[in-house]
Amino acid sequence: MNSKPLPGRAEDIEPFWLAYQRARNVKVEGFSASALGDTRLLADERAELVLAGIKRAHATLHRDFQKDLEPLPQIGDHLVVLDGGGQPRAIVRCTQVELRHFNEIDDAFAFDAGEGDLSLRWWLTAHRQDFSERAEREGFEVDERVELLLEWFEVVWPPTPSPDPAADPAADPPTGNAPNLSNPA
């Protein structure tokens, strides 16, 4: 299960994205879709943490954006979070972006990243290992001053069940099941 996450398929992602726009009555020009991990297992775990509201931030090596010539995320950008199988699980909207060196990560970011025991010690240990393994595999240097892109986000889709379904017309049915998006209206 250490294989790379599967890429998302447009026929799965597009209806998920359109359901969000229709239900929330928003018109957003573009979005990205990605797993938040480089293995299927990690992508699944992080997607669940996002859905549970525990993971509210994510760190990426800044070099990943530079080598792929991708623009940096901006406040207001949307991301469809994919699981390890490439299925859309959530849509998040970026609320804050920062560049920091690895040795500048603090307790607050580690807590917002929502992984492990939510401590800075856990985050530093896990990510030091992850970034070192990637550096060895991909042939680049990494140290305590490696630059990271930090993103904070809020989940905007799927809707969370509200105690009073009449209070939110886009809320899930009282069973709490996710809406069936395989055949959108």
Image (cartoon, rainbow, N blue to C red):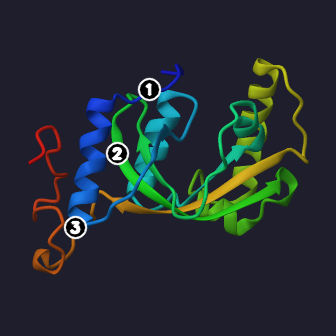
Q: Is residue 95 above or below residue 146?
A: below
Which residue type carries mark 2?
Answer: Arg
Q: Contact, CB < 8 Å: mark 2 with mark 1?
A: no
Residue type at the position of mark 3: Pro
Crowdedness of circle 1 by 10 Å Cα count: few (<14), some, many (20+)?
Answer: some
Q: CA distance from mark 2 to mark 3?
A: 15 Å
> Circle 1 sits in a helix, a strand or a loop, which is it?
loop
Image coordinates for residue 32, horizontal then vertical, percent: 48, 43
According to the image, label 2 marks what residue? 89
Say whether disc 3 or disc 1 marks the residue closer to the N-terminus.
1
- Do callouts 2 and 3 mark residues in contact (Cβ within 8 Å)? no
Considering only vertical position in the picture, is 113 above or below 167? above
Q: Which residue is mark 1?
A: 7
Q: Which residue is mark 3?
A: 161
The residue that appears at 48% across and 28% down in the rendered structure is 40
Q: Residue at x 58, y 64 (%)?
A: 75
